[in-house]
Amino acid sequence: MKLLGLIGGISWISTIDYYRYINQAVNKRLGGNEFADCIIYSLNYGEIIRHNEAKDFEGTFNIILKASLHLKNLGAQAIVLCANTMHMFADELEEKTGLPVIHVAAATASEIQKKGLKKVGLLGTKLTMEMDFFKLKLAAQNIEPIIPNVEDRNFIHEKIFSELGKGLIKDVTKSRYLAIIHKLVSQGAEGIILGCTEIPLLIKQEDVNVPVFDTTLIHAEAAVAFGFE
């Protein structure tokens, strides 16, 4: 198996799930006491948030690049960005490091295509919902994304940082998220992308009547599949 370099801490809560899913997927393939060859570089999320809020995306990229180069120097053969939003840098990161970046949106689009869906709701940080880096991967598979309205996007984003990224799970937040999902379904969404690695902590498939796509699980399994190519 290729040595995977994980950039975590964005947030540390969901990085735990990445580590668990990757090891479970490797063990499912190999059995016994076989688990993943991987390295985790865990960042200080606060520093990332400060750069992003100031729209200093170059500063954010430099943090991600530095971590990636450390992983490369340690022998990593691929980079796994353990956050959807950081995939805004995926193409540039591949160019600067010379390493493949396993893209969460491409992996998610493939899973949606397997189910034959053409229109899906996209939840995530404001950057994930409003920028093109995720939507373009969907469009490449002829999948149309629907995003929530401005008020709902603001709510989703705020709760990711004030609650979910700290491991806080509140019923009132879950109810509002489900109401937002219901609106997207009423607008024609055939499935829902949980496009932030913390959202699956709050929303599960059993909560929703259409397919949900847990990007944390999908991405982790895609990384393992790449590791065995």
Image (tube, rainbow, N blue to C red):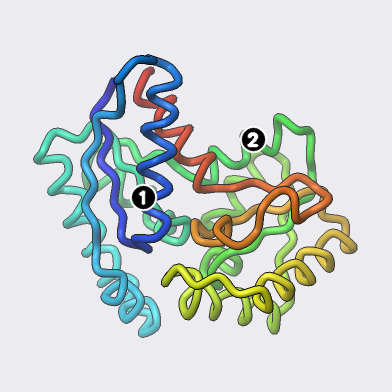
Q: Is residue 26 above or below residue 22?
A: above
Circle 1: element type:
strand
Name the disc covering residue 81, or none. 1
Question: Along the horizontal axis of the image, is 63 left or right of 152?
Answer: left
Q: Which residue in the structure is indicated by mark 2?
A: 111
Which is nearer the eye, 51 or 224? 224
Q: Earlier in the sequence, mark 1 or mark 2?
A: 1
Q: Quadrant of the N terminus?
A: top left
Which is nearer the eye, 171 or 178? 171
Alpha-carbon neighbours of circle 2 within 10 Å: few (<14), some, or many (≥20)? some
Q: Name which residue type carries label 2.
A: Glu
Question: Along the horizontal axis of the image, is 151 left or right of 197?
Answer: right
Question: Along the horizontal axis of the image, is 103 left or right of 51?
Answer: right
Q: Position of residue 54 (x, y in %)?
A: 36, 85
- What residue appears at the point 47 percent right and 33 percent down from the top-left corner? 222
Which is nearer the eye, 173 or 225? 173
Q: Name which residue type carries label 1.
A: Leu
Question: Along the horizontal axis of the image, is 181 left or right of 32?
Answer: right
Q: Quadrant of residue 102?
A: top left
Q: Position of residue 101 (x, y in %)?
A: 35, 41
Q: Gap in Å between the C-alphas at discs 1 and 2?
A: 19 Å
Q: Quadrant of residue 78?
A: top left
Q: Is residue 35 above or below residue 95?
A: above
Q: Is residue 182 above or below residue 8?
A: below
Q: Is residue 173 above or below residue 212?
A: below
Q: Position of residue 214 (x, y in %)?
A: 59, 47
Q: Quadrant of residue 28?
A: top left
Alpha-carbon neighbours of circle 1 within 10 Å: few (<14), some, or many (≥20)? many
Circle 2: element type:
helix
Name the disc covering residue 214, or none. none
- What residue appears at the point 72 percent right and 53 percent down from the top-left corner? 192
